[in-house]
Amino acid sequence: MANGKKIALGATLVALLAVGGELLYLHHERNKPIATKAPERERIADDDLVFLKQKRPASMTDMKDLFGTTVWISAGGQLEYYAVVGKSVQYAKSAGTLLGAQELKIKGAVEQVAPKTATFRIPGGDKQVSLLFEMTANPGKQYAVPVGYRQEGQYTFYTDEIFFYDDPHELYKHWGPEIWKAVDEHRVILGMNERQVQLALGQVSKSTSKDYGNRMVVFANLGKPMAVTFVKNKATAMREDQGY
């Protein structure tokens, strides 16, 4: 009997130890810090981190804030500019097309009735508004570029879409000298992304799909169409395309 009691007591003790051990384990598991893995941050492209200033002008008084300032063309290949006599825009003949990253010194602004030939990009309204400028690279001669219009006393301006208010060479300094040399010379080199090629060749283009950075884009390039193929937003091939 004594041996039986000892065996029963031993078995009970083992069971209690086992239960106690399990309770201690459960207590430890329930109270230990929860291991959390920090979510991986989506990498934002350097270009998308660039802050582009906007002025949102709504009147001719607002436009005066641009007088005496330097701006750079964002809407390359979109806008024709004209000679100026006095303060009259000479719409009869285009003096050229403004190119991406081109640097201008703003001198003033004028309102003038524009012919239909000058309202393809910027509406004419009752009167079209043009900015007077000098080219920084060739000072001394004034030109005019349409940037908005007045309709029934209300003004609409597109300056925020047309210009960089800060030097894009500094805004996009991370592009590096080789890319910027190509952009300033308005040509394409392999490895450029869509934004860089657009600034180099102009915004007038058509594409084979909406998959930005993975498609072929044909840039009008001022009458010398250039087809550029992008893979993972890098130019991998280019050729002239007379079928534009």
Image: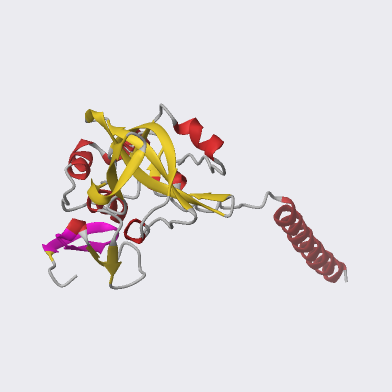
Measuring 32% from the left and 60% from the top, which residue is drawn there? Answer: 117
Residue located at (43% from left, 40% from top): 110
Q: How is the image coloured?
A: secondary structure
Residue range in magenta is 223-239
Q: Is residue 192 magenta?
A: no
x and y, in percent, of residue 7 in the image: 80, 68
Which quadrant, please, contains the C terminus?
bottom left
The quadrant of the picture occupied by the N terminus is bottom right
The residue at 15%/72% (across/down) is 243
Residue 226 locus on image (x, y percent):
16, 61
- Give the image location of residue 74, x and y in percent: 35, 46
Asked if one can make out residue 42 in the rendered structure from this viewpoint, the answer is yes
Q: Tell whether position 225 is magenta.
A: yes
Q: Is residue 235 above or below residue 170?
A: below
Magenta region, main secondary structure: strand
Query: Taking 50 as reference, is 192 above or below it?
Result: below
Observer-nearest of 188 and 142? 142
Up the image or down, 72 lies above or below 158; here it is above
Q: Is residue 244 left or right of residue 148?
A: left
Q: Position of residue 89 (x, y in %)?
A: 33, 43
Q: Does residue 165 appear in this view?
A: no
Q: Nearer the viewer, residue 105 or 145?
A: 145
Q: Quadrant of residue 84?
A: top left
Which residue sits at x=34%, y=50%?
A: 75
Q: Would residue 5 be found to the left or right of residue 38 on screen?
A: right
198 or 158: which is nearer to us? 158
